[in-house]
Amino acid sequence: MTPSVVLLIVLHLCSLQLMAVAMPRCWLPGKVVQETHHLLRDMGTRFPVQCLVYNSNISFPDSALPSTPANRTQCRQVSWVVYESLREAGLLFGEYDLPAGEGGVNWDEQKFDDFLNLQDRLVEQDGRCLSRVNSSVDLSSYFSNVTAVIQQPDSAACGWQALRRDLIWVLKSALQRHHNCFGWSQAH
Ligand SMILES: *[C@@H]1O[C@H](CO)[C@@H](O)[C@H](O)[C@H]1NC(C)=O
Ligand SMILES: *[C@@H]1O[C@H](CO)[C@@H](O)[C@H](O)[C@H]1NC(C)=O
Ligand SMILES: *[C@@H]1O[C@H](CO)[C@@H](O)[C@H](O)[C@H]1NC(C)=O
Ligand SMILES: *[C@@H]1O[C@H](CO)[C@@H](O)[C@H](O)[C@H]1NC(C)=O
């Protein structure tokens, strides 16, 4: 074989390899989810004590994520819970303004913007394949409760804080407990 034929074969193998890496089964890229988690965590302070009273209104259904490392079938559910939580949160961030000023939500603007960009990317690009999953998990009651709390001026700030707390929990638990459900080889 001439060197150029060898080169062609090598290039061909490389591109197959790249395709395999670039198109895994519908998996969210772990690094991006991790970065999204870090932005959420770092954009504000701890959950305010005065917001604890709304715990009875807003309590994320923990059972949405399997309590032990997920198998392949369960991974689909894990990915969907991450996808759906980010998607619904994105709708709320798009529809309602965060209360500003004293007693409002004082998140780091740059980090919040960066979070919104990654959130959008995960939902619109990486997670598109998850939009048609028929999940046995129901997050709609959780999100309608969050909506009710952020619609009331008195409780709005706490509603957003609770949503941020719960998103951090979802992303962190999914990444730690279900590490294998994410794609880790992709560049991002
Ligand atoms: C995955 O785990 C669930 C719950 O433990 C079980 O019902 C299911 O059969 C398992 N699926 C596979 C493919 O192992
Ligand atoms: C989801 O469920 C609906 C009704 O239960 C069914 O018609 C549809 O084919 C399912 N979709 C998938 C992707 O399984
Ligand atoms: C929704 O709010 C009701 C009370 O208003 C509460 O009983 C229920 O547990 C809440 N559900 C979730 C998922 O937060
Ligand atoms: C919180 O839940 C209680 C019932 O548990 C309800 O009366 C109240 O209106 C809810 N508050 C908000 C802000 O949704």
Image (cartoon, grey):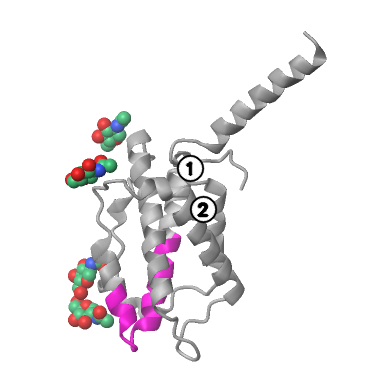
Q: Is residue 154 magenta?
A: yes
Residue wearing tag 2:
33
Which dot marks residue 182? 1
Q: Seen in the image, is 157 located left or right of residue 46?
A: left
Label 2 vs label 1: CA separation?
9 Å
> Label 2 crowding class (10 Å Cα cut-off): few <14, some 14-19, many 20+?
many
User: In the figure, 81 relative to 55: above or below?
Assistant: above
Residues in magenta, as a range: 147-168
- Disc nearer the start of the sequence (2/1): 2
Q: Is residue 21 magenta?
A: no
Dot 2: element? helix
Write the residue at 70% across / 25% down: 11
> Label 1 crowding class (10 Å Cα cut-off): few <14, some 14-19, many 20+?
many
Q: Seen in the image, is 129 located left or right of residue 101?
A: left
Q: Position of residue 22 (x, y in %)?
A: 56, 37
Whether the residue carrying mark 2 lies under 8 Å from ligand 1 is answered with no
